[in-house]
Image (cartoon, grey):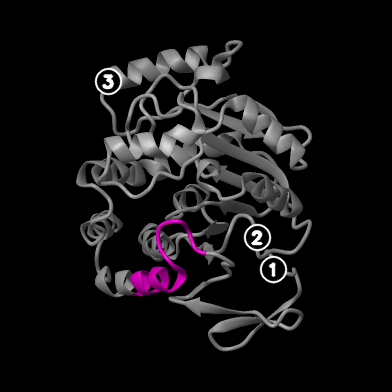
Amino acid sequence: MMRFVCPQCKGGLAESGNAYGCATCARVFPVICGIPDFRLFADPYIGLEADRAKGQALEAATRGMSFANAVRHYYAITPDDPADLAERWTARALAEVAIAREMLAYSRGDGPLLDVGCSTGAALIAAGGGMGVDIAFRWLVLGQLRLREAGVAARLVCANAEHLPFADSMGARVISFDTLEHLRDAAQSLREMRRVGSSLLLTSNNRWAPLPEPHVHLWGVGWLPRRWQAPFVARRRPDLHPYGIQLRSAEEGRELARASGWVNARTEAAPLFAPQMGASARRVLALYRGLRLAPGMSLIAPRWMIRG
């Protein structure tokens, strides 16, 4: 079991009632809906208190729902997310367990599993347990429902990837799927993963892939200078919240990981899986799998991965 510490000062925590308290820096971290909230700052889309309130409302509203219907309910009450993109994101969420099950074959080590950026816990279900961390409290509430539905016992924790609430050298087998591009400080997050982890499996969407940007489904976003990307997305999709994603190349990812302490990190084109796609798409992916390890493929692959 991974031991909690204060994410700010790394001092010891004492659990009392529905909170954890730090004797060193006097911070108090609440436990809401059974989920410890160790965040030092909110995610870019919603404030701390609004996120907690939305999570509590979701827990009440989705009792008795299937996970799939709970995700659809979430987007129905979140008008900031356009319907066409919400449909894509829902399909992705429902496919995540199958995708994670395939990706976990590339993870190594035998320490406790720690999923940084776990969202609704799909990888924990695929692994049969572990610890999941995410900044979005509301999604962790849906993750609890998903874990119960799957009959998997795992722990979900709300925290910043830049300030993980775990003791040093826990020997964790760290995984992080498609999270790096969303982080406020990717280098600090990778240093934190190294502080607690003994191995790393990380995937990220590739800036230079000759495909639509996977989050907002617009062509050419990654190829623009970074200072132009948010204005471009705002002009093309004024119905969407401000664009704050930072896609990186495989080269950038490798150098970032090595500078953060993962000195043996190596990058390659990531495997792709399409559990809900038709036969023609599966044939294209079969061709990609045959070419995935060819020299230079990580430069243009839709996703790259780091193993360290």
Magenta span dominant secondary structure: helix
The three-letter code of the residue at mark 3 reads Ala
Q: Quadrant of residue 91?
A: top left
Q: In this picture, is 60 found above or below 105?
A: below
How many residues crowd around disc 3 within 10 Å: few (fewer than 14), some, or many (20 or more)? few
What's the residue type where badge 1 is placed? Gln
Which mark sits nearer the N-terminus, 3 or 2?
2
Q: Is 47 one of the magenta-colored residues?
A: yes
Label 1 or label 2, whichever comes before in sequence order = 1
Q: Percent position (x, y) of residue 190?
A: 67, 46
The residues tagged by marks 3 and 2 sit, at their Cα atoms, a distance apart of 43 Å
Distance in Å between CA atoms under marks 1 and 3: 50 Å
Q: Residues within 10 Å of mark 1 (few under 14, many from 20)?
A: some
Quarter of the image that includes the C terminus: top right
- Find numbered disc 1 in the image and state the secondary structure of the residue it sits on: loop
Residue 63 relative to residue 37: left or right: left
Is residue 308 in view? no
13 with respect to 119 (left or right): right
Between 203 and 69, which is closer to the camera in this rendering?
Answer: 203
Q: Which residue is mark 1?
A: 8
Nearest to viewer (mark 1 / mark 3): 1
Residue at the spot 27% in from the left edge and 71% down from the top edge: 63
Which residues, given as a range, are shown in magenta? 42-56
Q: Secondary structure at mark 3?
A: helix
Q: Position of residue 256 (x, y in %)?
A: 68, 36
Which mark, residue 54? none
Left or right placement of residue 230 versus residue 278 in this view: right
Label number found at residue 163: 2
